[in-house]
Image: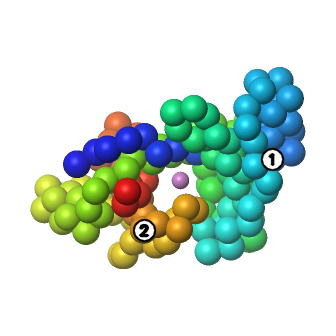
Amino acid sequence: MLGRLNHVAIAVTDLKSATNTYRDILGAKVGEPLDQPEHGVTVVFIELPNTKVELITPLGENSPIFNFLNKNKNGGIHHICYEVKNLELSINILMKNNYKIIGDNPKIGAHGKPVIFLHPSGFDGTLIELQEE
Ligand code: CO
């Protein structure tokens, strides 16, 4: 089912400071902040040679990452995103095996492709995002 690692998302409390660290100290290729109201986050993409890192910070009052930042005051790894060839097929397999999907239907993710989130309870406490290739 799983293809490439698409990105690792890190929840941050201070997007500017985190962005500066990745750009100025770690020497990474860092993009501009991008508001994603439908996901309740502002994102900065960091391009690495083999994958991406996304710095995410809450946007709006109902951001799904407020809870995470309440539990992890300094921020931390929020989710990892794997690519799959066929998202519907992957969802069917997971549901047949009683893994919990978050939300009903795939949404269009940060990269303009359908994504779905899998509940951490089935994956050793790790929130997993699947993105169609
Ligand atoms: Co993501």
Decide which of 85, 94 is in the foreground and name it. 85
Q: What residue type is labelled 2?
A: Pro
Residue 40, relative to residue 57: is it above or below?
below
The secondary structure type at the circle numbered 1 is helix
Q: Assess mark 2: CB under 8 A from ligand 1? A: no
Image check: 52 left or right of 106? right
Residue 115 horizontal/vertical position (percent): 43, 64
Q: In which quarter of the image is residue 65?
A: bottom right
Residue 3 pos. (x, y %): 32, 44
Q: Residues within 10 Å of mark 2 (few under 14, many from 20)?
A: some
Q: Do the residues labelled 2 and 1 touch (CB within 8 Å)?
A: no
State which quarter of the image contains the C terminus. Answer: bottom left
The residue at label 1 has a CB less than 8 Å from ligand 1:
no
Distance between the alpha carbons at the discs numbered 2 and 1:
25 Å
Q: Name the residue under label 1.
A: 15
Residue at 81% from the left image edge and 47% from the top image edge: 15
Who's the residue at 53% across and 38% down the image?
51
The amino acid sitting under disc 1 is Leu
Q: Among all residues in the image, which is located at the extreme left?
A: 96
Closer to the camera in the image, 67 or 108? 108
Q: Residue furthest top?
A: 25
Name the residue carrying label 2. 114
Query: Is 3 displayed left or right of 51 in the figure?
Result: left
Q: Is residue 13 visible?
A: no
Give coordinates of residue 74: x percent, y percent.
73, 36
Label 2 vs 1, first from the N-terminus: 1
Seen from the viewer's position, the closer of residues 61 and 32 is: 32
Label 1, residues with CA under 10 Å away: few <14, some 14-19, many ≥20: some
- What count of labels does the image hold? 2
Q: Nearer the viewer, mark 2 or mark 1?
A: 2
